[in-house]
Amino acid sequence: MKMRHCNTILYLAYMVILLGSGCSKDSVKPEFYIGREFGGGIVFDVSADGQHGLIAETIDQGASNWEDAHLLAQNGPHSEAGKAFTDWRLPTKDELVNLYHQKDIVGDFVNFWYWSSTEYGSNLAWEQHFDDGAQTTTTKIAINKVRAVRDF
């Protein structure tokens, strides 16, 4: 009987500490950081609260014109981990700049132009060179590399 009473007291003390600290088992959040393998790729951008951001695929999806690049980003080919997700897309112009700055962490980029999803008028779209970081517009019929991203 005494053992049961001690266990009850220990449990109540634990609950007081847990609830008094503002914590609960449901409030423990995963830690996201640039370079973490997660969600089918590598995290390359994290929000200020650390709970949202962007993931890049670990491999290129190929090369194509801008119209077909959207399909390549979405449908792959994707890495084994990336195949588990269906919300891959082309990065925006600004996301592509961030991805360029994290290219050594994400890895496996070639020194070539990569498409963004951002259009410039009806016939042009933004591209980023992964050798020198130059960003410019080009005709949508040009052939550029594709690297998919997804939100978390």
Image (cartoon, grey):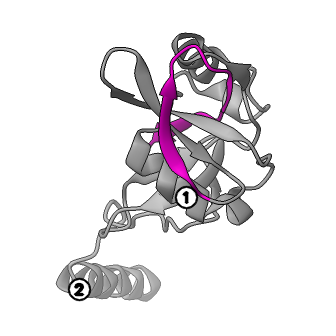
Q: Quadrant of residue 25?
A: bottom left
Instruction: State the mark number for residue 8.
Output: none
Q: Is residue 136 left or right of residue 108?
A: left
Q: Which residue appears at 55% of the width and 47% of the height? A: 55
50 is higher (above) or lower (below) than 39: below
**Residue nearest the observer in this picture, 24 or 145:** 145
Marker count (numbered): 2
- For the question of whether residue 32 can be seen, the reply is yes
75 is higher (above) or lower (below) than 131: above
Instruction: State the mark number for residue 21.
Output: 2
Q: Which residue appears at 46% of the width and 85% of the height? A: 3
Ranked by sequence position, the earlier of labels 1 and 2 is 2
Within-10-Å neighbours for mark 1: few <14, some 14–19, many 20+: many
- Provide the residue designation for mark 1: 44
In the rendered image, residue 42, in percent from the top left (x then y), is placed at 64, 53
In the rendered image, residue 16, in percent from the top left (x then y), is placed at 22, 84
The three-letter code of the residue at mark 1 reads Phe
146 is higher (above) or lower (below) than 42: above
Secondary element at image label 2: loop
In the rendered image, residue 105, in percent from the top left (x then y), is placed at 70, 64
Q: Which residue appears at 67% of the width and 59% of the height? A: 103
Locate the N terminus and report the quarter of the image it occupies. bottom left
Within-10-Å neighbours for mark 2: few <14, some 14–19, many 20+: few
Secondary element at image label 1: strand
Residue 141 among magenta residues: yes
Locate the C terminus and report the quarter of the image it occupies. top left
Residue stretch rendered in magenta on the structure:
133-152
In the rendered image, residue 143, in percent from the top left (x then y), is placed at 68, 21
Do tag 1 and tag 2 residues touch (Cβ < 8 Å)?
Answer: no
